[in-house]
Image (cartoon, helix red, strand yellow):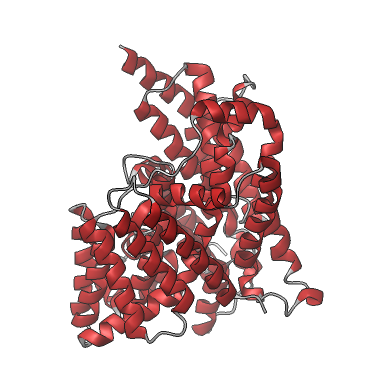
Amino acid sequence: MIGLEVLYVVAGVFFVGIAVLSARDKTNPKRWTNTTFWGLFAVSFLFGSHLPDVVNGLVVLAMVLTAGVFGFGRGAPATTGPEERRASAARLGNRLFWPALAIPLTALAGTFLFKRPALAGLVDPKQATLVSLILGVFVSLAMAMPMLRARPSVPMQEGRRLLDTVGWAAILPQMLAALGAVFAAAGVGTALGKLASAWLPAGSEFAAVAAYTFGMAIFTMIMGNAFAAFPVMTAGIGLPLIVQRFGGNPAIMGAVGMLSGFCGTLMTPMAANFNIVPAALLELSDRNAVIKAQLPTALLLLLANTVLMYVLVFRS
Amino acid sequence: MLSLIGIAVVVLGFMARLNPLLVVTAAALVTGLAGGMGPVEVVATFGKAFKENRYVSVVWVVLPVIGLLERAGLQERAKTLIGAVHAATTGRLLLLYFVFRQITAALGLTSLGGHAQMVRPLIAPMAEAAAESHHGPLPEEVRQTVRAHAAAADNIALFFGEDIFIAIASILLIKGFLAQNGILVEPLQLSVWAIPTAICALLIHGTQMMLFDRHLARRIAEGRR
């Protein structure tokens, strides 16, 4: 069955390739830093499932020290210039869009197909979306390579060019997910929830609703993830006050409460895969530029959620 | 309460603009030690959590093909396509993408988007080209704002669309949590109540996108003076 382990091997091989190409790039003054970093990441992908936890931990620490102390370099893989790209775009026309659109379309088709009983057992149903996305990459490559008559090393060099623009931020979402797990193991959420329910004013119906929606947003900003905030804030404020004391509707409280948390996700660097990684991918000089673009909508929507919950939750 | 020191480390570290990898690692180690774990145990806990979350980083495997298509002029072609449509302004284009992304997410089609697959190769260059065709070459700072807004549209539309779909992770989490506390609700009861917020998101962000073209024009005019 194709599941996460197969994807980890694919990703591991990809990062081995990146490490090898980084090592051979003499234009990058810090090429050994990049090689070590991506090489260690490849080790984590290829052998992580079989290594003892402590060794996995040491691999992470080595990656962090490599990137944090020595700093990342940026290679200069041979690519095309603006003139060549314009000429190539004019020559190929809209045919260029098909391989690009093949990735989401394959991901979509696979997500549905792999969950059908006839194909069950082929792909782990829990990972159908991720498997289909990676399958989409290969479909896209199969369309693009003959069309562009590219040598096999070209996609890897181009992949390295993009990965180097993202740099260390590429592992930040995974690091934050791991931090979330450590927080959970140490009981950080429960401690914060106690603090919040002791300090937030929640005497009236409106105060309880506002404490819950704003609490969800702030807690999500701290933890980087509304899923971590929801159980804690709902057990601390939502259920005892909105539902039990004031008789609110639990379904409305839960749905709008979660969406208030999402407003927090839009405002925090801790939600790196939505906010920090795109800033790196789009080569923005301000790491927080995406957050700044989202800030007005996030704040207005948080107010809207508070009003919506107050108006709706006690009615039905 | 001692376990909250880790949060202080994160907040101070991000504010001091230290390397986030160092900040996150320090926070994890401090939290574990404050929570009573030994040094080896902390490293092992962090390593195990890192290993179990590798699926988050698998998505980078899309970069080679995106880079390959960029090399062949994908961004340039996307720009040409939009530059030829006079009615396409940055605000209208991003609003159109927002509506598309929100509706598809509401139907559970969340994979029709994403920063590496859609925003960088297609949406960001299109938004830039729409601005250039109305205002001429963009000052770098304005160009970056346009690109940041392309990413913002993807995020906001996804967040406030996906909860209308009944089988999305967050709806299942709410249902599961309420069930643990003895309250049984159907996913449909939850997803219906995501609709008012989805409409508010569309109105609020849509208004902002409609005003965005004027905002761009003003910033460019100020820059020229």
Q: Quadrant of the C terminus of chain B?
A: top left
What number of labels is visible? 0
Q: In the drawing, does residue B77 fall left or right of residue B159?
A: right
Residue B71 in which image quadrant: top right
In-image side of A86 versus B109 (left or right): left
Residue A137 position in % (x across, y down): 62, 56
Quarter in which the N terminus of chain B is drawn: bottom left
Residue B173: x and y in percent read: 52, 73
Q: Is residue A189 above or below residue A277?
A: below
Query: Residue B82 appears at what percent x and percent y?
Result: 61, 27
**Image position of B83 with respect to A219: above or below:** above
Is residue A58 depicted above or below A109 in this figure? below
The residue most toward the top is B225
Residue at the image point whose x is 55% and y is 48% from the top: A154
Q: Residue at x 54, y 81 (%)?
A: B179
Looking at the image, residue B125 lies above or below residue A211 = above
Residue at horizontal 42 percent and vertical 76 percent from the top? B51
Q: Residue furthest right?
A: A118
Of residue A184 and residue B143, the one placed in the foreground of this image is B143
Q: Position of residue A153 (x, y in %)?
A: 55, 52
Closest to the observer: A120 or A254?
A120
Q: Is residue B218 visible?
A: yes
Can residue A235 be seen here? The reply is no
